[in-house]
Amino acid sequence: MKIRVGVLLLLALLSGCDDSAPAQKGFAGLGDQAVAFTPVVPGRVFSFPADHGLHEGFRIEWWYVTANLKDAQGHEFGVQWTLFRSALNAAPQAGGWRNQTIWLGHAAVTSATVHHAAERYARGGVGQAGVQALPFNAWIDDWQFSTQASGAEPLADMQLKARDPRFSYALRLTSSRPLVLQGEQGFSQKSEQGQASYYYSQPFFQASGELEIDGQRYAVSGPAWLDREWSSQPLTANQTGWDWFSLHLDNGEHLMLYRMRHKDGAPYLTGTWIDAQGHAQTLHAGEISLVPQDTAKVAGRSMPVVWAIKIPSKQLDITLHALNPNAWMTLRIPYWEGPVRLRGSQGGTGYLEMTGY
């Protein structure tokens, strides 16, 4: 999905403002009931470009970009850019300071030896952050993900930029391939009880541009991936975190997997196989073997940074290694997110996110 972590942070901060608030349910409150908000139900008909914009009535949503990049010398890098929207109530949002929306941005860069992460916060209604569908523009302060295309598909040609004292990047992302609806025609289930999000991706972006880390500049290029989701209650009270994978295979195919871990019982496991033309096939738990192989001590936690993935129906048997095992997002709510390398029946690159450890 990624069910993205900034939303969790917003909910945690908001609940923490009231000492009388009840204990959170599920990971970072995402299992809390949200009866006043619009539910996620099967059968939605997606409409583009409108669905690139925000969705009032839903509690949470995000625009999430990751990129696996190399320079001319073969040095590998990862880039993350995320914008999260959290609604404090389900009513239509007013303008100005009466607006009840909170925005959060995360940006990060990773190399084999360095990982930097930053975050920004904004109040809705005053222009500091927001999203518009046409022409598409998502921003928080001077961090921006916006269209440069003039045709019917605004995501065909994008610019992505973020800046922090320790790093910056300015990338162009292009794709002529179709968007991919995850799950069952965009209905992405997260539990056996039916919790879900609306979820689509653009896994076919090609990125190029400039990256700066600690004063050193690099000209870089490589594949990138956009995840778009919105929901109101995507988890159950029993779900403690997740492991999320978005993978670019060398043969042009793509794979998205996630397992939602529980306090007790087996994880909820599913995924999507995307062929080189953009056709998507849902993968169910019985078709997937996803097993941690090795761990690293990261920020006082034991994190699984090597994984084995097998999908027999696709003749896939790979091992996934973190480019930098210390890709720890040292933010208000910390989590692990970074680029990975693939070895085995297919080579490739991708991104891994792990929460709740």
Image (cartoon, grey):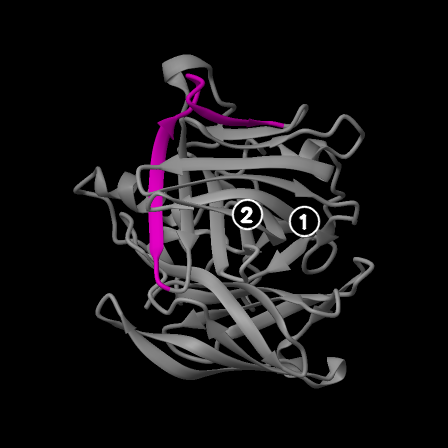
Q: Residue at x 57, y 56 (%)?
A: 72
Q: Is residue 285 above or below residue 146?
A: below
- Specify the amino acid type for callout 2: Val
Instruction: Point out which mark residue 102 bears.
Output: none
Where 244 sits versus 263, above or below?
A: above
Label 1 vs label 2, nearer the camera: 1
Which residue lies at the image location 43% right of the left edge and 49% below the top edge? 33
Q: Position of residue 268 (x, y in %)?
A: 53, 72
The span from disc 1 to disc 2 (Cα, nearest Å) is: 10 Å
Instruction: Identify the residue at the far top of this view.
Output: 96
Image position of 195 (left or right of 207): left
- Please check the rendered image and state whether residue 239 is part of the magenta-colored stretch, yes or no: no
- Magenta segment, which residues? 113-132
Question: What is the quadrant of the C terminus in the image?
Answer: bottom left
Image quarter for residue 122? top left
Q: Is residue 47 left or right of residue 349?
A: right
Q: Residue furthest left?
A: 19
On the question of residue 26 being in view, the answer is no
Q: Is residue 232 above or below residue 191?
A: above
Residue 210 screen position, x and y as percent: 52, 42
Give the main secondary structure, helix, strand or loop, of the magenta stretch: strand
Res 205 label: 1
Q: Secondary structure at mark 1?
A: strand
- Residue on which disc 2 sits: 65
Q: Is residue 129 magenta?
A: yes
Give SS at disc 2: strand
Q: Amino acid at mark 1?
A: Phe
Comparing 96 with 226, the one in front is: 226
| Image quadrant containing the N terminus | bottom right
